[in-house]
Amino acid sequence: MAAQVMDSSFEQEVLKCDLPVLVDFWAPWCGPCRAMGPVIDELANEYAGRVKVVKMNVDENPASPSKYGIRAIPTLILFKGGEVVEQSTGAVSKSTIKEMIDKKIG
């Protein structure tokens, strides 16, 4: 299951993580976000030990989404070594997310 990350822990949990990190920027009122929730949790299990998968509630944590220019949700951002290496906005399929991850982590 994907862990929750907050603005206060974003630097430590995401930017300073040794693993690539997939961040799901979402909100409880967003239908497409809720629809993607189970897929995000499945990916967290499938990539355990290779990619850290976390979720960030944009309503409760406005600083990080603002810093990364999040204008629409759901938005997925893949970080590697503290840098954005891939980004996707809108509800996408599990296979699309896996392709996004696999092409960046090898």
Image (cartoon, rainbow, N blue to C red):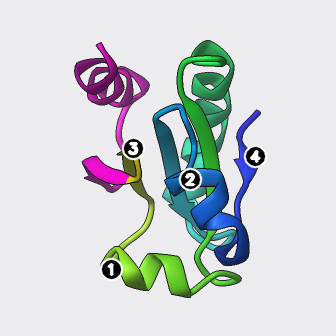
Q: Earlier in the sequence, mark 4 or mark 2?
A: 4
Give the number of the mark in front: 3 or 1: 3
Quadrant of the drawing holding the C terminus: top left
Q: In the rendered view, does 106 fall on the left or right side of 37?
A: left
Q: Which residue is the site of mark 1?
A: 71
| Distance between mark 4 and mark 3 Cα atoms | 19 Å
Q: Which residue is the site of mark 3?
A: 81
Q: Amino acid type of disc 4?
A: Ala
Q: Which residue is the site of mark 4?
A: 3
Kindly tell me whether residue 59 is visible in this rendering.
yes
Q: How crowded is mark 3: few (under 14 residues within 10 Å), some or many (20 or more)?
A: some
Q: Please count the marks in the image.
A: 4
Q: Give the range drawn in magenta.
A: 83-106
**Above-or-below relation of 52 to 11:** above
Quadrant position of residue 46: top right
Q: Amino acid type of disc 1?
A: Arg
Q: Amino acid type of disc 2?
A: Val
